[in-house]
Image: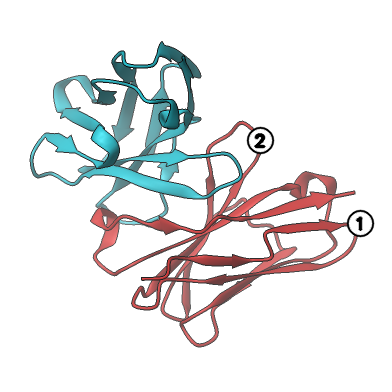
Amino acid sequence: AQSVTQLDSHVSVSEGTPVLLRCNYSSSYSPSLFWYVQHPNKGLQLLLKYTSAATLVKGINGFEAEFKKSETSFHLTKPSAHMSDAAEYFCVVNHSGGGADGLTFGKGTHLIIQP
Amino acid sequence: DTGVSQNPRHKITKRGQNVTFRCDPISEHNRLYWYRQTLGQGPEFLTYFQNEAQLEKSRLLSDRFSAERPKGSFSTLEIQRTEQGDSAMYLCASSSSGGARQPQHFGDGTRLSIL
């Protein structure tokens, strides 16, 4: 079984300050981990992925995430927030063991950017 | 790469009616997935296809739901005798083969509202 916990339902930061969105996962197998972003009434866009290569993963729009196996975490960070970053962010796990390749999503973190 | 396309974008119907949604995946992708997303939640896996074969169905997919991918290209999701609880965003995603490590690319979804 696999699951994802996003520790904050809402995060509010000022424009130009760092962003931290927290995610913990559990998986019985070697996980693949992803972060997706969803803007209102739109589908999900892939930000970055971890698939057992480098533990520090760089994605689009200045985002990056670090896979920490000992902490079962995959937190998303960005050094300086922009207004356009305001959206819903989902941490997602998929496992390379048997079974469906359907993704398991966290409940999402709503990122608010204050001007 | 024209992206994943879903039609219609919005569907409003009366309870008890049948509805059908269409998904056109990225042309070279042989895997296609359906998800359901309710307000304030992350998407939940419903089913997936590899080429024309439907390989797994979630227990969320009641017998009122049926999905097809007859020629291994586009897919349809039909809901019969719709109920209030079916109101949600239905998302389609596609990926290339390669299992859990391949990221899924999402369409913008079909929002279903049951009156």
Q: How is the image coloured?
A: by chain
Q: Is disc 2 placed on a helix, strand or loop?
A: loop
* Residue A21 falls left or right of residue B62: left
Measuring from the top left, give residue B43's x and y in whole percent: 53, 44
Give the residue number, with chain letter if any, for mark 2.
B39
Amino acid type indicated by mark 2: Leu
The chain carrying label 1 is B
Circle 1: is it few (<14), some (14-19), or many (20+) Cα within 10 Å?
Answer: some
Q: Nearer the viewer, residue B80 or B73?
A: B73
Q: Are marks 1 and 2 on the same chain?
A: yes
Q: Is residue B115 above or below residue A24?
A: below
Which hue is chain A drawn in? Answer: cyan
Q: Quadrant of residue A66?
A: top left
Q: Is residue A80 above or below residue B1?
A: above
Is there CB contact under 8 Å for labels 1 and 2?
Answer: no
In this rendering, the count of numbered labels is: 2
Measuring from the top left, give residue B71's x and y in whole percent: 50, 88
Give the residue number, with chain letter if any, for mark 1.
B14
Which hue is chain B drawn in? Answer: red
* Residue B77 falls left or right of residue A87: right
Please report whichever mark, 1 or 2, sits nearer to the chain's N-terminal start: 1
Measuring from the top left, give residue A17's x and y in whole percent: 31, 13
